[in-house]
C-alpha cells in the first residue's frame, strides 16, 4: 500500500540518477528569485515535476489530518502530528508560489476521502498504525530531497535541499522515537 509512495517521492526529484528540477525551480522554491533569474531551464518540465511534489505534499497533509481526526493519536503525539502537518503546509505553500511564479497551474488537492482510500486509512486501528504510515511517508520525502543535492553546482541550492531533507529527517526521527524504535545503528542511513 504505502510502500509505493516511497519511490514516488524519491523519483519526483530524480530520473535515472540525475536531478530533473532545474536550478531555477529550486531557487524559486527556496524564495531565491535572484538565483532563479540567473538560471536557465525547461520551465514546463519543472512545473510538472513541482506539481508531482505538490501532490505528495497534499498527500502528507491529508495523512496527518486523517491521523489527527482518527481519535487514535493521544497527547502529546497528536500535538506533534499537527506540528508536522503545519510544516508540510508550509512546503505546499512554497510549491504553489513557485509553480505560479513559473507560469504554471498548481495541481488541485483531492478530497479527504480520496486520500483515505489511497492510504488505506480504514486499516489504521492504533496510534502505532498512524505513526508507521507517517514514518514511511517521511522517509520517502527525506530520500527524495537527499537524492537531488549532488546535482547542484551552486552551494546555496544544495544547502536549501539539505534543509528540506533535514525537516523530513527530523519528522522521521521523532516518529521513530514515538514508536519506541531504536535509531539506526549504522551511519549513512538516509539517501541510499
Image: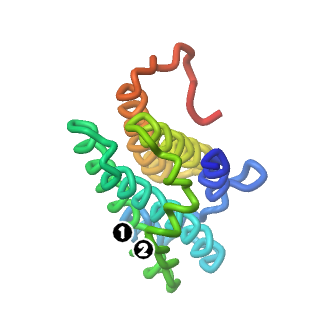
| Residue beneath the point at 49% across and 53% down | 121
Which residue is pictured at 52% across the width and 69% down the height? 114
Q: Is 38 on the left-hand or right-hand side of 69?
A: right
Task: Left or right? Give the position of 44 relative to 66.
Answer: right
List the single residue furthest toward the top. 185
**Residue 45 locus on image (x, y percent):** 65, 74
Residue 146 image offset from top left, x and y in percent: 56, 42
The count of marks equals 2
Taking the image as drawn, is residue 151 in sight? no
Residue 170 falls in which quadrant of the image?
top left
Q: Which residue in the protein does label 2 denote? A: 96
Alpha carbon of mark 1 to alpha carbon of mark 2: how far?
5 Å
Q: Which residue is mark 1?
A: 93
- Numbered disc 2: secondary structure: helix
Frontmost residue, 61 versus 46: 61
> At 56% from the left edge and 54% from the top edge, which residue is drawn?
120
Between 72 and 80, the one lying in front of the other is 72
Q: Does the residue at mark 1 contact the one at mark 2 (Cβ under 8 Å)?
A: yes
Amino acid at each position: 500500500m504505502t510502500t509505493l509512495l516511497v519511490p514516488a517521492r524519491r523519483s519526483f526529484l530524480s530520473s535515472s540518477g540525475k536531478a530533473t528540477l532545474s536550478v531555477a525551480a529550486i531557487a524559486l522554491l527556496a524564495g531565491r528569485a535572484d538565483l532563479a533569474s540567473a538560471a536557465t531551464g525547461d520551465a514546463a518540465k519543472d512545473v510538472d515535476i513541482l506539481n508531482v511534489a505538490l501532490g505528495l505534499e497534499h498527500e502528507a497533509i491529508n495523512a496527518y489530518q486523517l491521523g489527527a481526526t482518527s481519535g487514535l493519536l493521544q497527547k502529546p503525539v497528536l500535538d506533534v502530528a499537527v506540528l508536522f502537518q503545519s510544516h508540510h503546509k508550509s512546503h505546499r505553500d512554497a510549491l504553489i508560489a513557485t509553480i505560479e511564479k513559473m507560469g504554471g497551474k498548481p495541481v488541485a488537492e483531492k478530497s479527504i476521502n480520496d486520500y483515505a482510500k489511497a492510504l488505506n486509512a480504514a486499516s489504521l486501528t492504533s496510534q502505532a498504525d498512524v505513526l508507521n504510515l507517517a514514518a514511511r511517508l517521511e522517509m520517502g520525502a527525506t530520500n527524495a530531497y537527499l537524492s537531488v543535492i549532488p546535482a547542484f553546482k551552486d552551494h546555496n541550492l544544495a544547502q536549501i535541499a539539505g534543509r528540506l531533507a533535514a525537516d523530513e529527517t527530523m519528522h522521521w526521527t521523532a516518529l521513530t522515537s514515538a514508536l519506541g524504535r531504536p535509531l539506526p545503528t549504522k551511519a549513512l542511513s538516509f539517501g541510499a
